């Protein structure tokens, strides 16, 4: 097993990732209605979203330096924004699962890692969050 983005993958999965480039979105800050407690439902909380997408080099290596030859970064940010626009969500786990599913639906995405963290939930730590990693079925 090899570690990729803090996730262990088997050799076959590692080989799939080796033929990919990684696109990423770092610390995308959104204000969102999230949480199960009554006080969390009274307003929005700051949430940081991180995404890694693995796309095959063979399908996303530009030959003519044109946007249509690669996966447009707007897809990543737009997917997150579209999910946030759906309204209140109770669990970070549900949120990252929804995002992972939506990102893996893109035909150029081979694998993805999605994390969400609440940086303001506790005063004695940087953040509390959750991460999920998945592959598009072969």
Image (spheres, grey):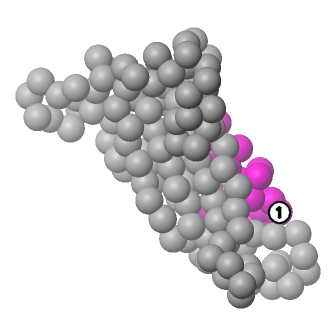
- Magenta highlight on residue 101: yes
Placement of the N terminus among the 4 image quadrants: top right
**Towards the viewer: 4 or 64:** 4
**Towards the viewer: 94 or 15:** 15
Q: Which residue shows up at 43% across the image and 54% down it?
A: 25
Residue 100 in percent (x, y) is at 62, 40
Q: Which residue shows up at 74% across the image and 58% down it?
A: 92
Residue 127 placement: quadrant: bottom right
Q: Secondary structure at mark 1?
A: loop
Residue 54 in percent (x, y) is at 44, 32
Q: Is residue 15 above or below residue 47?
A: above
In the rendered structure, the answer to whether residue 13 lies left or right of residue 45 reads left
Q: Is residue 115 above or below residue 57?
A: below
Q: Which residue shows up at 48% across the image and 65% down it?
A: 27
Residue 22 placement: quadrant: top left
**Towards the viewer: 83 or 24:** 24
Q: Is residue 32 above or below residue 122?
A: above
- Magenta segment's dominant SS is helix
User: What residue sits right under mark 1 in the picture?
Assistant: 90
Placement of the C terminus among the 4 image quadrants: top right
Residue 97 in percent (x, y) is at 71, 44
Residue 31 in percent (x, y) is at 60, 75
In the rendered structure, the answer to whether residue 110 lies left or right of residue 67 reads right
User: Does residue 42 appear in this view?
Assistant: yes
The residue lying furthest to the left in this view is 64
- Magenta highlight on residue 14: no
Q: Is residue 79 above or below residue 104?
A: below
Q: Which residue shows up at 73% across the image and 79% down it?
A: 121
Magenta stretch? Answer: 84-104
User: Does residue 104 appear in this view?
Assistant: no
């Amino acid at each position: 097993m090899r570690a990729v983005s803090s996730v262990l993958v088997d050799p076959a999965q590692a080989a799939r990732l080796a033929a990919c480039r990684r696109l990423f979105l770092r610390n995308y800050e959104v204000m969102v209605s999230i949480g199960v407690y009554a006080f969390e439902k009274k307003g929005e909380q700051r949430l940081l979203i991180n995404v890694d997408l693995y796309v095959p080099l063979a399908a996303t290596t530009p030959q003519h330096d044109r946007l249509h030859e690669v996966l447009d970064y707007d897809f990543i940010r737009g997917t997150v924004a579209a999910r946030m626009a759906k309204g209140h969500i109770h669990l970070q786990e549900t949120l990252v699962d929804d995002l992972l599913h939506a990102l893996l639906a893109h035909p150029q995405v081979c694998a993805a890692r999605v994390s969400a963290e609440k940086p303001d939930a506790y005063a004695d730590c940087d953040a509390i969050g959750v991460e999920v990693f998945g592959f598009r079925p072969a």
